[in-house]
Structure formats: structure tokens, C-alpha cells
Image: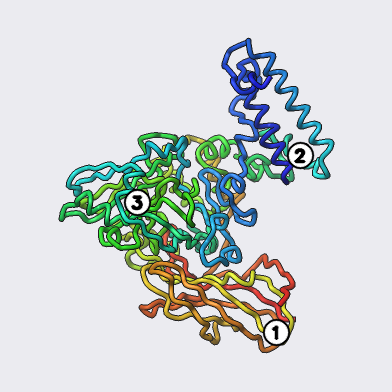
Amino acid sequence: MKRRNFVKKAGVGAVSTVLLSDIVYRNLLPKGYSPLAFQEPDPFKMFHKDPEMVLLNDKPWNMEARAHLLNDDVTPNKFMFIRNNGIIPEDIDVSTWQLKIDGESVVNTKTYSLADLKSKFKHYTYQLTLECGGNGRSEFDPPAKGNQWTIGAVSCAEWTGVRLKDVLEDVGIKDDAVYIGYHGADIHLSRNPQKEPISRGMPIAKAMQDETILAFAMNGEDIPLTHGYPLRLVAGGWPASVSGKWLNGISIRNKIHDGEKMGGSSYRVPCETVAPGEKVDDEDMCIIESMPVKSLITYPKSGAIINEGKSLKIRGHAWAGELEVSEMEYSIDFGSSWKSIHVQKPVNRLAWQHFGGEINFPKKGYYEIWARATDTNGNKQPMVLPGWNPKGYLNNACHRIAVKVV
Amino acid sequence: MMKGKNTPTENSSKYKWPIVATVFFLLMGVGVWYFIGPEESEEEIEEISEIDPNRVENGIHVRTGLIEAEGLQEVINNCTTCHSSKLIIQNRMGEEQWNSTIRWMQETQGLWDLGDNQKIIVDYLTTNYPLLKKGRRKALSNIEWYKLDQ
């Protein structure tokens, strides 16, 4: 594996670099052809991801975890899903990076350097659950277009930064402010500089929460490039698309932000439930806010074969958007009966919670372990798909793993 | 020699010999690596010959992973310029949905008018990547069984 990459990078890469620098040789290249090293960079190496991660898309980069990879309490970078809408910014210069705060409802437009943000405001560290709104999309029928996420577009890393509310108070916002919209340095796939790949946001109330931060570190280090280096807006519990990466602007709006992917069917679901496949008009769609209650069994990996008479340790995480998980249950008989399993309190609000315990099987056979979390409002995860929606968001059907007792 | 490699200058014949020498040296290096390294050698030849942009293997267009069939070239030319073929392969839609997706790409993503190619492309997609019925929940599949030591 190592050697192949050497050939790929040092061999073809360096050769083509040299070739491309000489016009004589450049003319020999077929039109529209780019050398292997440019065509197929290894995303696992490039983004320091575990090779067991699953690549869904390479233009833009999108990659998800598998359930058993998410066993850590705090998700390390190597197991963190990537969801990009555009091209990762090129030539990031931290010394000149600026965050501009503007909009109809800002008192005075103001610009901060990274150093300003770090020195002027108090730092906070939180573990925050970020789940892609489309996590679980692959299960919808009729299918919803987009990246076909299965269960792995969720993470809970430790983010460090300054509170957005502290910054907004420093800037000064008008009474008519209703929403903030973010802007990032990523590049639209068409490379049209007039277009933003994504520019979403949140109501002022969410922006003012203690845990909504402008982060400059993840898991104690600089944020990895693909996760928003050098500055990311992080708003846990909401679709991860609210947590704008490569943050260089925030607009304080006097109306709901109308940036890219705020309208149409993007990150919106029918305000009233519809039958699968039904057409829904734009005006009948509502923006997703808090993510629903959900859980994942992260140990053991699905497919375990165990001996009869042995108990099995299971563990995993549960989260509930803005809320907390109040109860965790599992079933080994396809939902006929449910048993409680211990779930810990979150380390801070909006962090996922860990559950675990030992379970026993009555006799030999094929089993599925189903996990079901309940939030503080009493909502439980459904066993089958929840309400269909055009873009396949919010699938929080219970997670299942297969076990054989022999 | 290192100077030639590190400061390539466009259109300059001054650097041509150093460049040629560098290429030669690198290829020698690759060759030596290839001979002294263990196994995997066939895979490397494979890897390098994958540069052929039109290669088809077992009915699959190698570079994009798309099924070789009528309309493939139109799909490659019009779709994969902006997004990955992986996005096409993982999505299953009917004719109407593909057409509305194309419309969406034209309205918001800068896709050009496809003209006669639109029907060719949509036919290719619906034929080669047909809709799958999943129901309200599929059975667990592709389970990788393993013995768990307890």
C-alpha cells in the first residue's frame, strides 16, 4: 500500500509536475487529460481518515463513518464524516484571515482577525454532536437524491472557540435581528466566484446559546482543513450544515437568511407530513431546526458470532438535537419487547450520551439488536422510516445490528 | 539537477536538459523501487495503465465506475465535468425525477442546456441505474460475520 502511494505521488506526480513545466511535453498530453496524481488524490491520506471510512463522493468530498468506527466517546478526526458542498478553499493564510460581521441588523459592520477573536473573547470548550440532516437518506423510498448516507454522518468532537453571542454583543445588533447567515471561503463547484456553495444560518435565539461557538480548534488541535480550518461556526444539535466551515462572514439579518441552501427542498421538510413521493410546493416546506432523537450501537460491529450462554457487552451513543436523551432501550426480538439499558448524562448540553450494558440471549439463533432512544419530550425513535420528505432528511429509525448465537 | 526540478520555468529551453535528466532519474527511481519492492507489482502496472481515460473492464468504464452502455459518453461529458460520477451511481431516480434534477442543476448550479443529449442521458440513467423498491425498511444485508472473542 505504502509503495503504491509512493509510485502514485513521487512517480507520476513528480514526473508530471516536471512534464507540465515544459511546454514541449505539455503539448503531448491528450486534451482534457490530467495526470493520475491530480485526478485521483487519496482522500483517506489527504484528510487523515481511517481506510474503513466510506467515500460517497469525490467532487465535492463526502465521506461517512461506519457504526463501529464511532465507538470513541469523543470522535477523532479519522472517524469524522466529511460533508462538503463545494471545493475546499485553496491558499488559506491564517495571518490575513478575517471574519466580517455585516447585514441589515448589525449596528456597525465590523471585521475581526483570528488573533482578535482569540485574544478579545473568552474561550469555551464543548463536545458537540454534529449530524448531517441527510444522515440515513439511503433508506428512503421513493429515493431522495443526494449523497446516500447510511448511518455514519454523525460525530461528536470537542470544539474550542469563542461564543458567537459574545462576538455579537461586541459588534452590536439591532432589535429587528431575526436570523444570522454565515459565509465561508469554500468555492462553488462551478468555480463561479459569484456563487456560494452553501450559506445557511440560524435564528438569533440559537445564535445566542452558550454552546454556539466560533471554533478554532477541534479535539485540542487546529481544525482539520476539510472540517473548516481555520474557523468554523459550530451549532450542535442542528443539521450540521448550520455549522458553517471556513467561516469568513456572518450577516445579521432582519429576515430569515436567504443564502444558498436555505430555500427549496434544501434542509427543509414538508410542514405537514405527506405520503411517500408526494409533490410538495416550496411554500409548504419548513426549515429543519433541531435534529430528532437518535442512537447508534457502536460495539460490537454488526455480524458478531458469539457462543450460547455468554452475555454480550454492547455500547453506543444517543443524542436528541436540542434536547437530552432520557431513556435508552434495546430489543433482541424485533421490537416485541424492550429492555432499558443505562445511558449517561451528557458531559455538556448538545453532546451525545453514552449507553452500555450486558445483554443475554435465551437460545441459539439469529438475532438483531435494535436500539431505541427516548428524548426528554417523550419522543422515541421509530422502528421503521419516519415521515417521507423530498430530500430524505431526518431518518432517525432505530439502529440495528446482527448477532448470531451458536 | 535539483535546480532544474525546483525552479521549473515555462517556455525556457535553458532548463530542458535538467528536466529531461530529472524525468530520467525519477523513472529510474521508480524502476528500482519496483524491482526491489515486495509483491504488489502487478497492481502498480495496473494503477499506471488506468490513466487510459476510455478503458472499459467487465462492462464498467474504469475511470468513472459508470456502466458502459449507450449514452455513457454523453453522461461523462455533461455530468462529470461538475460533479463526481459517484453521485450518479449512488442515486436511483425515475425519468421525471432525473429531468427535474437536471432542471434544478440548470437553474441553480450553472448546468448548460443539454439539447438532444438530455433524453440520451436520462435514458442511460433510468436504464442502467433503475429504481429499487426499498419499502418502509429493508432487511439487514451484506452482514460480514465474524467470531467475537468475549
Helix, strand or loop at mark 3: loop
Chain identity of mark 1? A
Q: Quadrant of residue A302?
A: bottom right
How is the model colour-coded?
rainbow
A46 versus B6 height, above or below: below
Identify the residue at horizontal 32%, vertical 61% (top origin): A286
Q: Earlier in the sequence, mark 1 or mark 3?
A: 3
Where residue B25 appears, as percent x and y from the top left, is 75, 24
Residue identifier under label 3:
A200
Identify the residue at horizontal 57%, vertical 17% (top origin): B9
Identify the residue at horizontal 47%, vertical 36% (top origin): A90
Where residue B122 appears, as percent x and y from the top left, is 53, 45
Where residue A152 appears, as percent x and y from the top left, is 54, 61
B81 versus A129 height, above or below: above
Residue identifier under label 2:
B44
Query: Where, quadrant-wise, is the C terminus of chain A in this rendering?
Result: bottom right
Q: Amino acid at mark 1?
A: Lys
